[in-house]
């Protein structure tokens, strides 16, 4: 895998009582919880609707220094994460922070957690007390309210994003100020220093043309907009928050673009804890992501233990090695959407195929009944996992064969039989497999580039990072589609020669 981020003379930032996250940067701080870079750097003022006068600043704004604009979000090291973590009682740990230069030297480098000493497998690398962790329980102070809000109105991510936005308005008065400063520095960038496609421009989203991921990005963006439209209602329901910020109605205080950036920032670093209450299951953990890198084949996870969240490493580390944790069984499309990176060694990567019985088929109801008896639906989703394309084809065939049955007596025999959905003649089998081949080839044709063109593109070391990670994704998808075509053709080769001309199938299942 070619990685677009290069490390140049990393600065080591040991986490210890004497030097915990003690960094200084000459670059202007960047604010992911603020206005996009296309906006000018100015402080927004809102008119207070109650008095008609000028209200408080809505949000502190930070910008990229290459725009030649000053940032109003100035910070000093004395108020940084180092002092905060020490003062709040972070226990001694075995990790340190390092930084790597990004593709654009005009923006702040990203930080990442590395071993400060040799660490043996099964060792606790660090333990963060609960008082340093942001959850809905700590935000709302009421588990019942948390469940009500997230069940009926907003996701946990939206609630956490909204809370941090209001806390950021408090500046240094906020207890979370040092943590928010670090989140701003990271700007929701993943381990390849690339933001989620949710923050890409329309031209950049074109890198994903042909991939289902592009549609997922647009769908997620629409969902974020719907949540934004519910903010005011939720604000009044959450009495504790309304009392804490009584004059700041969400949609008046924050434009949608600001909320979207905050949502994406929280999305990139939230941890899903296991075996805890609903109000604590989504947590923002200092020293957790995005400072910790995700890896699909890693087994270590942040876990709740006693009054803290801790990380027990799953293998040995040498001093200076980057610490990684498991990101869960997520396909690459989800990794890119949530965290801005693609894992070339992801065993959970998959293609999604939706097959549906033809509703115009006179025997549709009987076929639907036969499908349900075998644990399938009239509209069935199949997953093709990387490296297991042949197995996926074999799993799909019984369902697809059902759509090719046309004889009523044969359909009755299928309904009364046990076991697989149905068996059909060799010529029908060829028709089913040819339909699959045509389907996979059509998906490949939907991409504007070929697999070979993607391979050549990845050899360009100066390729823009967002385009690189998008090309990584579509290249992996195309490899899986090619493998599906080959698996289908291999099965066709085993059919008798006299089935060269497949039988007609007027009510073949739909594939998409």
Image: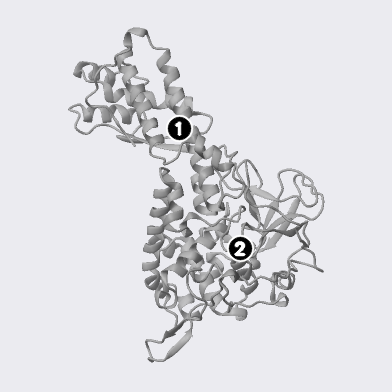
Q: Are marks 2 and 1 in contact (CB under 8 Å)?
A: no
Q: Residues within 10 Å of mark 1 (few under 14, many from 20)?
A: many
| Residue 212 visible in the shown view | yes
Q: Is residue 360 above or below residue 323?
A: above
Q: Number of marks in the image? A: 2
State the quadrant of the C terminus. Answer: top left
Q: Nearer the viewer, residue 355 or 492?
A: 492
Q: Residue at x 37, y 8 (%)?
A: 496
State the quadrant of the N terminus. Answer: top right
Q: Position of residue 244 (x, y in %)?
A: 50, 80
Q: Secondary structure at mark 2?
A: helix
Alpha-carbon distance for marks 2 and 1? 35 Å
| Residue 349 visible in the shown view | no
List the residue tagged with mark 1: 481
Q: Earlier in the sequence, mark 2 or mark 1?
A: 2
Tell whether 321 sits left or right of 138. right
Q: Secondary structure at mark 1?
A: helix
Q: Position of residue 89 (x, y in %)?
A: 73, 69
Q: Nearer the viewer, residue 90 or 10?
A: 10
Tell whether 172 sits left or right of 358. right
Q: Residue at x 45, y 78 (%)?
A: 242
List the residue tagged with mark 2: 186
Q: Is residue 113 above or below residue 483?
A: below
Q: Residue at x 66, y 47 (%)?
A: 300
């Amino acid at each position: 895998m070619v990685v677009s981020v290069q490390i140049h003379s990393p600065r080591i930032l040991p986490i210890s009582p004497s030097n915990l996250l003690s960094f200084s940067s000459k670059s202007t701080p960047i604010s992911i919880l603020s206005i996009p870079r296309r906006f000018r750097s100015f402080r927004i003022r809102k008119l207070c609707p109650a008095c008609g006068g000028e209200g408080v600043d809505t949000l502190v704004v930070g910008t990229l220094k290459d725009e030649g604009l000053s940032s109003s979000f100035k910070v000093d090291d004395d108020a940084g994460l180092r002092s905060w973590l020490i003062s709040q009682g972070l226990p001694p740990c075995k990790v340190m922070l390092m930084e790597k230069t990004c593709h654009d030297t005009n923006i702040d480098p990203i930080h990442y957690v590395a071993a400060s000493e040799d660490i043996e497998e099964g060792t606790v690398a660090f333990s963060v007390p609960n008082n340093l962790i942001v959850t809905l329980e700590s935000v709302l102070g009421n588990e019942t309210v948390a469940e009500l809000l997230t069940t009926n109105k907003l996701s946990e991510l939206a609630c956490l994003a909204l809370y941090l936005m209001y806390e950021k308005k408090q500046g240094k008065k906020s207890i979370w100020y040092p943590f928010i400063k670090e989140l701003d520095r990271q700007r929701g960038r993943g381990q390849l220093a690339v933001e989620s496609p949710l923050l890409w421009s329309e031209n950049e989203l074109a890198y994903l043309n042909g991939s289902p991921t592009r549609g997922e990005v647009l769908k997620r963006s629409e969902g974020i907009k719907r949540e934004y439209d519910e903010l005011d209602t939720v604000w009044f329901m959450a009495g504790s928050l309304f009392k804490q910020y009584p004059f700041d109605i969400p949609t008046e205080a924050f434009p949608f673009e600001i909320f979207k950036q905050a949502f994406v920032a929280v999305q990139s670093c939230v941890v899903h804890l296991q075996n805890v209450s609903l109000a604590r299951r989504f947590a923002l953990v200092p020293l957790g992501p995005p400072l910790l890198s995700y890896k699909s084949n890693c087994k270590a996870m942040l876990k709740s233990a006693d009054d803290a969240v801790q990380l027990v490493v799953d293998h040995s580390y040498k001093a200076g090695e980057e610490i990684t944790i498991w990101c869960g069984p997520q396909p690459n499309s989800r990794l890119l959407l949530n965290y801005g990176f693609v894992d070339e060694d992801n065993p959970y990567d998959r293609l999604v195929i939706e097959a549906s019985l033809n509703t115009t088929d006179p025997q549709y109801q009987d076929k639907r009944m036969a499908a349900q008896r075998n644990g399938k639906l009239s509209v069935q989703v199949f997953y093709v996992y990387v490296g297991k394309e042949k197995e996926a084809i074999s799993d799909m065939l019984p369902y697809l064969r059902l759509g090719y049955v046309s004889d009523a007596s044969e359909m009755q025999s299928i309904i009364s039989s046990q076991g697989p959905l149905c068996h059909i003649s060799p010529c029908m089998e060829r028709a089913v497999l040819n339909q699959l081949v045509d389907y996979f080839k059509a998906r490949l044709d939907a991409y504007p580039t070929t697999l070979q063109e993607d391979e050549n593109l990845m050899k360009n070391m100066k390729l823009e990072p967002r385009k690189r990670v998008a090309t990584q994704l579509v290249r992996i998808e195309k490899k899986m589609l090619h493998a599906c075509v080959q698996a289908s053709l291999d099965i066709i080769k085993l059919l008798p020669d006299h089935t060269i001309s497949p039988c007609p199938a007027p009510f073949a299942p739909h594939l998409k």
